[in-house]
């Protein structure tokens, strides 16, 4: 990457800074340093000097470290969230598979119920047939008993 140059003013002194950042970014950084130096000098009630520069550097380092700690915390939370997301995606995929399996089972059960219903109807028809045949046999049995009585009666009359 090409080095960019920027003319900046920090606490009234002009500097030419160069770096890999854009010219606008270099100016933004210089303005930040200028603002921090002015804030520190106001707090010390003095003009910017070496002592001001050191305290400003310490303040900037403190902010940098706080931001580094915050970045580490956010990265840790982000990693945990990624793990949580993966866990919930796995749970979602498992739930979708279970729903699919249950739908298949429901369809199988429905088909089985239809088959069982047809078997039940066939068995019911056979039972009705058997009941009718049983009734016919009972009627025939009654008729045969009556005929047997008649024959016995006729034979008794014949014997007398």
Image (cartoon, grey):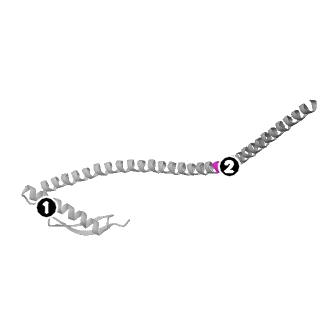
**Which residue lies at the image location 9% right of the left edge and 59% below the top edge?**
42
Q: Is residue 54 left or right of residue 21?
A: left
User: Which quadrant of the structure image shows residue 53?
Assistant: bottom left
Q: Decide which of tag 2 and tag 1 comes sooner along the chain.
A: 1
Q: Which stretch did the figure color magenta?
A: 111-117
> How far is disc 2 from disc 1 in space, using C-alphas?
89 Å
Other residues around mark 2 within 10 Å, as few (<14) / some (14–19) / many (≥20):
few
Q: Label 2, secondary structure: give it.
A: helix
The location of residue 86, given as percent across then percent down, is 45, 49
Other residues around mark 1 within 10 Å, as few (<14) / some (14–19) / many (≥20):
many
**Which residue lies at the image location 31% right of the left edge and 48% below the top edge?**
73
Direction left: furthest residue: 45
The location of residue 54, given as percent across then percent down, is 16, 53
**Which residue lies at the image location 79% right of the left edge and 41% below the top edge?**
139
Magenta region includes residue 44: no
Query: The C terminus is located in which quarter?
Result: top right
The location of residue 106, given as percent across then percent down, is 58, 50
> In the image shown, does 157 or 71 lie closer to the viewer?
157
Q: Label 1, secondary structure: give it.
A: helix
The location of residue 8, given as percent across then percent down, is 21, 68
The residue at which mark 1 appears reads as 38
User: Which quadrant of the structure image shows residue 142?
Assistant: top right
Q: Is residue 17 left or right of residue 99?
A: left
Eyeballing the image, is 144 above or below 78? above
**Which residue lies at the image location 33% right of the left edge and 66% below the top edge?**
3
Which numbered tag is attached to residue 115?
2
User: Which quadrant of the structure image shows residue 27?
Assistant: bottom left
């Amino acid at each position: 990457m090409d080095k960019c140059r920027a003319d900046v003013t920090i606490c009234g002194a002009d500097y030419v800074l160069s770096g890999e950042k854009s010219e606008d970014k270099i100016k933004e950084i210089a303005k930040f340093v200028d603002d921090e130096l002015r804030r520190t000098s106001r707090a010390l009630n003095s003009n910017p000097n070496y002592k001001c520069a050191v305290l400003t550097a310490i303040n900037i380092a403190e902010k940098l470290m706080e931001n580094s700690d915050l970045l580490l915390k956010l990265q840790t939370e982000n990693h945990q969230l990624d793990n949580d997301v993966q866990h919930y995606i796995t749970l979602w995929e498992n739930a979708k598979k279970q729903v699919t399996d249950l739908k298949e089972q429901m369809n199988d059960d429905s088909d089985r119920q239809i088959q069982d219903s047809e078997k039940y109807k066939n068995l019911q028809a056979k039972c009705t047939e058997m009941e009718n045949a049983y009734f016919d046999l009972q009627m025939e049995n009654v008729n045969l008993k009556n005929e047997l009585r008649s024959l016995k009666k006729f034979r008794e009359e014949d014997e007398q």
